[in-house]
Image (cartoon, grey):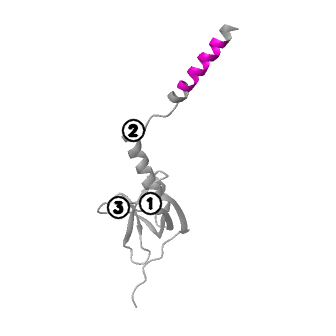
Amino acid sequence: MGSRLAVMIVIATVSPMASVADKPEPSTSRESKTSKKKEAQRNARLTSLTGCIDEEDGQYVLMDERTRRTIAPLQAASFPQEGFAKYLGHKVTVRGTMPQSGDRPLFQVRSVEKISDVCAAPQEAK
């Protein structure tokens, strides 16, 4: 019976130590930078823009249907960049986020919805 008591005492003293060792270690600075970046992306304001997909200097852009001026250069965020090719010349609504930094920030597109197969030609003055 004395040996059973000794086993119980050993278990009781080992068990609290095991729970202390199971606690996660504090996060490293690299992990905190990554989590801050992800949090900023989640907090970025989602918006939508409507216009015509075109290509300028190898970059896909969204153009104003009437004035033919560039609304925003486009960057695919959740699909391959080449995915814009099937929308060239189409009127679309793109949904995503626009970073606030850079000379010409890229609109980060998460989705594209086709509105029309063609873009209206600019109307001539009468």
Q: Which mark is residue 105?
A: 3
Q: Earlier in the sequence, mark 1 or mark 3?
A: 1
Question: How crowded is the residue under tag 2: few (<14 C-alpha within 10 Å), some, or many (20+)?
Answer: few
Distance from disc 1 to disc 2, alpha carbons, whole Å, reads 24 Å
Q: Is residue 35 magenta?
A: no
Q: Which mark is residue 28?
A: 2
Q: Hey, which residue is sitting farthest right in the picture?
A: 1
Badge 3 element: loop
* Closest to the observer, 105 or 2: 2
Q: Is residue 7 magenta?
A: yes
The answer to whether 6 appears left or right of 21 in the picture is right
Badge 1 element: loop
Magenta stretch: dominant SS? helix
State yes or no: discs 1 and 3 in contact (Cβ < 8 Å).
no
* Closest to the observer, 14 or 44: 14
Q: Which mark is residue 44?
A: 1
Give the x, y percent position of residue 52.
45, 69
The answer to whether 32 appears left or right of 90 in the picture is left
Range of residues picked out in magenta = 5-17
Give the x, y percent position of residue 107.
41, 61
Question: How crowded is the residue under tag 3: few (<14 C-alpha within 10 Å), some, or many (20+)?
Answer: some
Q: Callout 2, which amino acid?
A: Thr
Which quadrant of the figure contains the C terminus?
bottom left
